[in-house]
Each structure stands twice: as structure tokens, then as C-alpha cells.
Amino acid sequence: MSSTFDALFTSSPKELTASQDFALSYSRFFKANYRSLPIYKQNPCYRSFHKPFHHIESDNPNIHLSSVIMSVVTRAKRKRTGSSSGTGPAVNLAVLQQHPTLWYEDGNVVISAGKTMFLVHRSLLSRQSDVLAGLMLSAVQSHGSSPVEGCPLVTLDNSADDIAVVLTAIYDSRPFIQGIQLTFSTVSAMFRLGSEYKIQWLRDEALSRLQACYPDTLAKYDELVDRFDPKRPMPWTHTQDYEVALLAQSYFLNSILVTALYECCTGKPWELLLRLGLNEEGRQTPSTSVPFNRELIQKLFRGRSELVTLRTTQTFGFIDEKILTKGCTKKSLQMCLLVIHDMATNAHKLGLLMDNACALDQEEDFIDEAGKGGCQSCIALWKKRHRAGRQRVWDSLYMVFRVPEELDL
């Protein structure tokens, strides 16, 4: 009798058998022994069983123990229609909606994210991601079929939009690998979920786009197309550089991080704060979905101040140095000195050296225009010094923005 009783509480709710004869035969045994059996409290259904039996101790003649046992066992066996498959947070199926396009009638697994459900094919997802394959297998083994289309339900804690990006890429990868322009939100989802679910090609494609817009060498940076050029891998937005910096910081993509931070500094950081919805009290209003990162903003303001100085001392350093070539003849010497003096004056008048953080800008056209009257050998030297100064600025970006963090003393 004791072994049969133990079997009742060591079985899963699905395996419990409930019959009137069973309940009647064990009613007296429960009344005498249920409190003293340690296995009772070890069972995962303890809370479900425990509350109804509180009445037993009173020996209330109006309570029939067999009915109590029957009600508890029946409740344990009842299918749960308001929870997930156990692979994610609990969901309320009543509020979930089918995705308009990622709902295949012949699908055999349902994925829920946020308030959206996706009916997809388990075999296709399993080939793309071992992580998703494991989650789907766990859903099948743990709870079998769910109340959704008779298919296993896998609940993910990602946003519905992000999951839609990944599933769309899995079912049709052509727009993602043919160089078609994709928004940063799409590229971000590709990289984050590609990393999380070990979909390597998706992560690599996203990283390739990020590196194309935020390169790791000055030569590649000089080859960048205009921000608004449709050939750009990602269309530019006013907060994109900051959002890229956030993503790069989270995943330790330091080369992308410093370039994105520099791009932020080429604008005005205080305008960025307004676009992030920061009010006069320094608090972010709920009107924007881009998070405010105080540490990153501090890097921007501090880095911008240093870039203004570097533009003067490095990018335009040749002006103050007043260096002339050995080939500058006595006849042209005085003229070249006068030209470089006028060049410095014009640079200040044009605002090229006044609170300007664009220390990587190419200014050779300015040298050609302002250097008219100087000898060719001196003009060539000034351009060379200008290029060397830009390279020094590029090489110092890690220090300027204190990246990696161990440099932030």
C-alpha cells in the first residue's frame, strides 16, 4: 500500500490516475499518514495537493476525503492552457496574436515572443541553430503538444520584431546577403540574436554591415560614401551612431565603438541629448525608445573636447609649425612664409579651428586653395604633414574615448 501511495506522489501530473475506487481505498490511509511522509513535500505538485488537505486534520464529517483526493488529482491532470511550454516566461495565450506572414499552416512548432505567435517549421530552424533546436526539443519532451494548433510552444524573451527579423532571414536570406540596404534596427537584431542563438551567418552578415559603415582603418574610413548615399549598407539616422556605439559597447566591438563615438562627436552631443528625449532636468522622457547611457555620453563630451584640440595640433599642425622644404629657394622663401601665415588666418575665419571636432576631415582642397602662391614643394610638404596628423588622430581614438575600459583611469 505504501509503495502505491509513493507512486502517486512521485509521478508527474500526467501520469497520475484518478478513479473513485482508488480514492476510497486510500482515504483512510491519507488521513492517518499523509503528514508523516517526507516524499509528499518533495513532490513538485506539493502546493497543489497541500491546500485541500488542510481540512483533514479537523475530522470534519461534512468533508469526504475521497472527494478531496479526486478533485486534487483531477486538477493535477487538467491541461494547462495559460502557460508556456516551460522554455521561457509564462504567457497568456488569450492575448497572443498570429504574425501576419510568419504563420505557416503546415508548421509544426509555435514560437511566441511578446504578444505575437509564429507557426514555423522545427526542422528548418533546427538546421540553422542548435540553440533553437534544443529549446524546441525541450518543449516537445516536457509538455508534448500545446494548446496552439496542437504544436509545441516555445516562448522566447526577445521582442516580436527581433524574432520576426531572424525568422524572415531564415526563410528567405536573399535580402540579407545581397547587399540590399537594411535599417540599423534590423542589423542590430541580426547581430544580437545571431549571437544569442548561434546563427553564425546571420551574425557575420550584420557584423560586415557594421564594419562597412564604421571601419577600423583610416584608409577605409576615407572611402566611406556619403551618409545619405543609397549605396550605404544602412540608411543613416540622427541617433544611429549613438545606437551603434551602444551595441558595440555591449559586445566589446571596440574598433566599431571608437569609430561610432567619433561620428557622434562630429555633430553636437547636446543635440543628441535632445534627440534622446532628455529634458532640462536631465531625465529621459518616454517618447524615445533609445536608452540613455550616462557612461557613453560622458565619453562623448570628454572625447569631443580632446578632438577639438587634436584637430588644431595634429590635423592643422603644419600651419603653426611653419615648416618649409629645403627645396624652397630664397626667392620663394618669403612668399611661402606669407602664404602659410595667410592660411592660418583663413582657417580661423572659416571656423576650421574653432570648436571643431572633425579631426579626421580631409582638408587638402583647402591647402590647394589657400596655398596658392607657395612653391609646389612646400604645398606637397603641407599635405604630407596634414595626412600624417590625421593618422595620428586616428591612432589616438582608443585613448581619446578610453576604450577599452581599462584605459579609463
Image: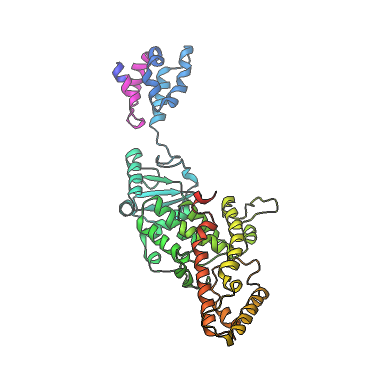
Residue reaching furthest to the front: 330
Name the residue rendered at 42%, 45% in the picture. 155
**Viewer-closest of 52 and 179:** 179
**Viewer-closest of 17 and 401:** 401
**Residue interval drawn in magenta:** 5-29
Q: Note whether 229 is above or below 259 in the view shown.
A: below
- Principal secondary structure, stretch drawn in magenta: helix
**Viewer-closest of 209 and 353:** 353
State how the image is colored: rainbow
x and y percentages locating residue 260 in the rendered image: 52, 61
Which quadrant does the N terminus fall into? top left
Name the residue rendered at 56%, 82% in the picture. 368
Q: Note whether 189 is above or below 339 in the view shown.
A: above
x and y percentages locating residue 232 in the rendered image: 47, 70
In this orientation, does residue 296 appear? yes
**Viewer-closest of 289 and 56:** 289
Residue 100 among those drawn in magenta: no
In this orientation, does residue 60 appear? no
x and y percentages locating residue 215 in the rendered image: 45, 65
Q: Note whether 389 is above or below 164 in the view shown.
A: below
x and y percentages locating residue 172 in the rendered image: 37, 62
